[in-house]
């Protein structure tokens, strides 16, 4: 697994202004927050941090299902199979809020 300390969201080209750009930006921002908060914590702590921040954002209307999917797509390659499975369960739970 890659180090979360050195994690940077993947970008193939500079962001373009479009309706989807704001969704990608929010997912990337959430990813950055969680990666920095996760430094030195266990995977369980990481998942609880993801869930807490995402639930708050979703309930406040600042996080959409599309943004949740984008977050998963960016974050999951950094995880092993077990962690990815747990994250997928968290994603499914969040999308039902």
Image (tube, rainbow, N blue to C red):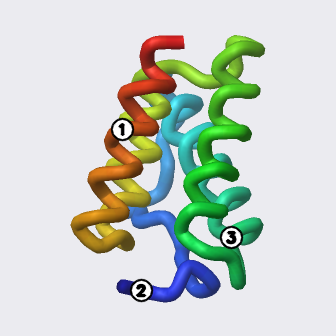
Indicate which disc, 2 or 3, sits on the residue closer to the N terminus: 2
Identify the residue at image location x=53%, y=20%: 64
Which residue bears the numbered disc 1?
89
Residue 4 vertical position relative to residue 47 in the rendered view, above or below:
below
For label 1, the crowd category at 10 Å Cα-Cα, with few meaning under 14, some 14 to 19 and many 20 or more, is few
What is the CA distance from the residue labelled 1 to the residue labelled 2?
A: 21 Å
Horizontal relation, residue 67 to residue 89: left or right: right
For label 2, the crowd category at 10 Å Cα-Cα, with few meaning under 14, some 14 to 19 and many 20 or more, is few
Residue 51 vertical position relative to residue 12 in the rendered view, above or below:
above
Which residue bears the numbered disc 3?
38
Indicate which disc, 1 or 2, sits on the residue closer to the N terminus: 2
Front in this rendered view, residue 38 or 77? 38
Q: Mark 1 or 2, which is nearer the eye?
A: 1
Percent of width and height locating residue 33: 72, 57
Percent of width and height locating residue 67: 48, 31
Which residue bears the numbered disc 2?
2
Identify the residue at image location x=51%, y=87%: 3
Indicate which disc, 3 or 1, sits on the residue closer to the N terminus: 3
Q: What element carries label 2?
A: loop
Residue 40 vertical position relative to residue 43 in the rendered view, above or below:
below
**Disc 3, disc 1: CB below 8 Å?**
no
- Quarter of the rendering occupied by the N terminus: bottom left
What is the CA distance from the residue labelled 3 to the residue labelled 1?
A: 19 Å
């Amino acid at each position: 697994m890659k180090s979360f300390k050195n994690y940077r969201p993947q970008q193939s080209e500079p962001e373009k202004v479009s309706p989807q750009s704001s969704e990608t930006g929010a997912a990337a921002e959430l990813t950055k927050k969680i990666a920095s908060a996760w430094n030195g914590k266990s995977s369980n702590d990481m998942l609880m941090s993801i869930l807490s921040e995402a639930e708050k954002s979703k309930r406040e209307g600042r996080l959409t299902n599309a943004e949740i999917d984008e977050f998963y797509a960016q974050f999951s390659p950094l995880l092993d199979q077990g962690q990815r499975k747990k994250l997928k369960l968290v994603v499914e739970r969040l999308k039902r809020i």
